[in-house]
Image (cartoon, rainbow, N blue to C red):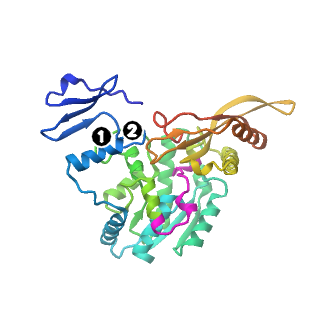
Amino acid sequence: MSHGDELDPKSINDFKVIATTKNSVAAIANPKKKIYGVQFHPEVSHTEKGEKILLNFITKIAKLKLDWNMPSFIEMETEKIRKQIGNKKVILALSGGVDSSVLAVFLHRIIKDQLLCVFIDNGLLRYNEAKEVVAQFRKHFLIPLKYVNARKIFLKKLRWVSNPERKRRVIGKLFIKILKKESKGFYYLAQGTLYPDVIESVSPHGHSQTIKTHHNRVKQVLKMQAQGRLVEPFQQLFKDEVREIGKKFGLPDSIIHRQPFPGPGLAVRIIGRVTLKRLVMLRKVDWIFQKKLMEYNQQKNFWQSFAVLLPVKSVGVVGDRRSYGYTAVLRAVSSLDGMTADFEILSKEELTEVANEIVGRVEGIARVVWDITSKPPATIEWE
């Protein structure tokens, strides 16, 4: 799909080729030594029979038992957390997303009042999101929650930043700084880090390249990790597995099926500089898009659906006068784990209605386009 790597059959000596594509060797084997290699990703949903390939390797070659299940994982991590934390206090940055919400409930069941959840409003959230998250969390869970309004300081720090990696680092660094200020007396930091977050930021098992720095893998967090002060029980799980834990704990569907939202928020959906004006514009576009998807009963069909604001302006016509406004991109994808994703699209009638309402109701938007790129070669997010 997007790799340029190739294996020369002449270089594999003790191995035999067991699968090929029209371009290169796809799999090799040394049955005597029980060593097998593949030049593709059997773990991703795009690979046909990939799950069977992994199952065959696990059961028929490695001779492992299939005794891993969610109850055993919960039990194992519970004991591990108790041993790690002891009587020390833990602070958790709650975003309201699936990962941090499930983790908050999980930890509270184990350590009770040793846990404090902090919701930092960075001003980069979707329309009315901060209010909804805080209200919902306090309604469903009796867990201590502190709300911190940090909108102005985040916007000030991002004023002249346009590079996407720089944005992520600025946001992550400031986030940790505020969290530290709120966490006096708390030794551990708990994060709902998932496996894709880890391998896209820094490979834990090799020398793969950084695809993008996730907010939970900035320098300050890595330092705490080296000190053994991170609590991350989900770091080898995928989103669907965390949702399964949430169901077992009785979390409402509104949280379990909440779409993934990037840690840096709308900052990485505004291409280029982040300003208050652009944030307001993007929020309105995204709100209209989500509202229309709910009307079409489509939102639940997508892994993610969102709007992106481009710094590109184009000529339009509003009424009888010439306009010159920004371009909004709409994106919807389907996925099982976020590692790969296929683009989705609406009907022509639905697309027309969405585009007309956005251009008609959001001042400053002159054009609406639809993203039809899958992952890979693109990422789900634009930055």
From the top left corner, tell me how far across and down residue 346 is, in percent. Answer: 64, 39
Q: Earlier in the sequence, mark 1 or mark 2?
A: 2
Left or right of 277, for residue 89: left
From the top left corner, tell me how far across and down residue 263 is, in percent. Answer: 51, 52
Q: Is residue 79 above or below residue 40?
A: below
Looking at the rendering, the stretch of residues picked out in magenta corresponds to: 247-266
From the top left corner, tell me how far across and down residue 66 is, in percent. Answer: 28, 57
Q: Is residue 268 magenta?
A: no
In this view, the residue in front, 230 or 64, is: 64
Which of the labelled discs sits on residue 207, or is there none? 1
**Circle 1: is it few (<14), some (14-19), or many (20+) Cα within 10 Å?**
few
Residue at the image point whose x is 59% and y is 47% from the top: 266
Which of the labelled discs sits on residue 48, or is there none? 2
Q: Locate the N terminus by quadrant.
A: top left
In this view, the residue in front, 309 or 357, is: 357
**Dividing the picture into quarters, in which one does residue 321 lie?**
top right
